[in-house]
Image (cartoon, grey):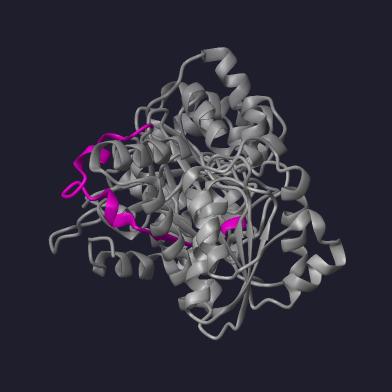
Amino acid sequence: MSKVRLYTCEAIRKIEDIFVGEYGFDFSQLMDYAGIATAQAVLSRFPDIKTATVLCGGGNNGGDGLVVARQLLLKGISVNVLAASTFEKATPQTTKNKIILEKMGKTIHETKKIGDSELMNLLKQSDVIVDAILGIGAKGAPRGESLRLIRAINQSDCPVVSVDLPSGIDGSTGQVMGEAVRATVTVTFWAPKVGLYVMPGKEYSGEVVVANSEFLSTCFFPDVAGVVEKDLYLIDAPEAKALLPEVALATHKGKRGSVLIFAGSKKYKGAAILSSLGALRAGAGRVILVVPVGCCLTGVGPETIVFEVPSMDGTLSADSYDMAMDEFGHIVSAIVVGPGVGRTNGVRELVAKIWKDSSVSTCIDADAIYFLPAIMEQFACRKDNILVTPHEGEAARLLGVNSAEVSAKRLQMARLIAEKYATVLLKGPGTIIDDGKKTAVIKDAHPCLSVPGSGDVLSGVIGAFMARGLGCYDSALCSAYLHARAGVTLGLSVGNDGVLASEIAGLIPKEIRRLSQQESNHG
């Protein structure tokens, strides 16, 4: 199984240079390949269209758009071609396609000469809009006529097909450079680009179609295989399937491993139940739930071993770790700490003790993450056997920045956490897993996962895969994939609202089975 790499814009430019410099293509041919693929995607996804408006910038992305316009015209579609630029500084290949289109009798209208109301009428009367304003060569926030067109597209309520990238999205990071087109479909070329799968770019990209990927075949063009800037991968079924632990007829609960979960408090009981449920549903052999006396877990399943420890304030403490390890340390193969534990001094001491003393794979989640900046000041050592699982707000606290900065620069922030603390799973759509050297982005996502307890279930699933023998990075990758797929499945049957975290946990075994039965090769 070959892993699916994500490529930066710089890597794609290098690949195109290799096609031209080493294999005899010219840039006009590459532009034709891009434009033809986009036109095919438009016609396949919107087969009944009669009219289209193609909005072009002055660069090569605009040139791709001119090819799209030509191809749609040849298929009998009525096409309006609007240009944000006069093409005075256009590349030879873009100029060539402008001349071809004009010789076909098509007038290219400068948008500077079109008023706002007329522009909006043109867009609203179209069956589809093709966004070819800004591509991988764009620098900085859109401005001038490009910005005006982006805003008009977003106000039109028409289906939008973006060429290579939604205009305004940084293809290397997923950042929104000021404002960006919200595409229905994005047709990207040669290889999947980082910014189409990492938030916030993922949200703007709609359905992503990777066209002409066969050109990266090492059989025909081996030189392009060396164009690798980062160990950055897109995670779908084949990658996750390769990590699933084998289950033989002779497998018993001891071989499935034992996960020790420090969770819950007098105030927050449900998180402990959900975390233990996630671990059980992901196939852990034993789930030992350590809770303070008086937590009253009336909803915990009989399959969970509940180990109550003394408490002065209704929360866990450092002594909780010693007591649990004295009783179960000989069988424990993974630890989870954090769901519903609260933020007392006792919990801080517990997390510090686990950070310092744990020798098994450990997931630090939820409230436990709150104490890590202070713990790092105390111990000042990155941990290889620990996974931290923050949402964006928790990640911001770990780095001393605001959550908006984390939202805008998710890849960069995940790497900083991984280098400073431990392997990280940064929650959210397009979940990121980073161990400081390589990065994985989960392809699937669904808004129905944004419910109370969803993260608690995920922590338990992670603990189960750690207990079953996967390391921190692989446990995070496999668990995040299954969690996301459970969300997609629930979203299809229930919708975006009203999903319960326990329902997410309940689908994990089915998603594991579905994954294990899938073909291993990418389609």
- Which one is nearer the viewer's eye here, 85 or 428? 85
Query: Could one spot residue 328 in this view of the protein?
Result: no
Left-right relation of 432 to 3: right
Residue most extreme to the front = 103
* Residue at the image position 65 percent from the left and 47 percent from the top: 168
- Which one is nearer the viewer's eye here, 91 or 1? 91
Left-right relation of 410 to 41: right
* Quadrant in which the C terminus is drawn: bottom left
* Residue at the image position 55 percent from the left and 86 percent from the top: 48
Rendered position, 419 above or below 65: above
Query: Could one spot residue 67 in this view of the protein?
Result: yes
Left-right relation of 490 to 211: right
Rendered position, 167 above or below 53: above
Residue most extreme to the left = 250
Where is residue 154 shown, x and y percent of the image?
Answer: 73, 62
Residue most extreme to the bottom = 48
* Residue at the image position 56 percent from the left and 18 percent from the top: 376
- Which one is nearer the viewer's eye here, 401 or 144? 144
Where is residue 410 shown, x and y percent of the image?
Answer: 57, 39
Where is residue 196 shown, x and y percent of the image?
Answer: 52, 51
- Which one is nearer the viewer's eye here, 486 or 40? 40
Rendered position, 335 above or below 348: below
* Residue at the image position 70 percent from the left and 52 percent from the top: 84
Magenta-drawn stretch contains 215 = yes
Where is residue 335 shown, x and y percent of the image?
Answer: 42, 39
Rendered position, 242 above or below 508: above
Residue stretch rendered in magenta on the structure: 204-229
Magenta-drawn stretch contains 11 = no
| Quadrant in which residue 210 is drawn | bottom left
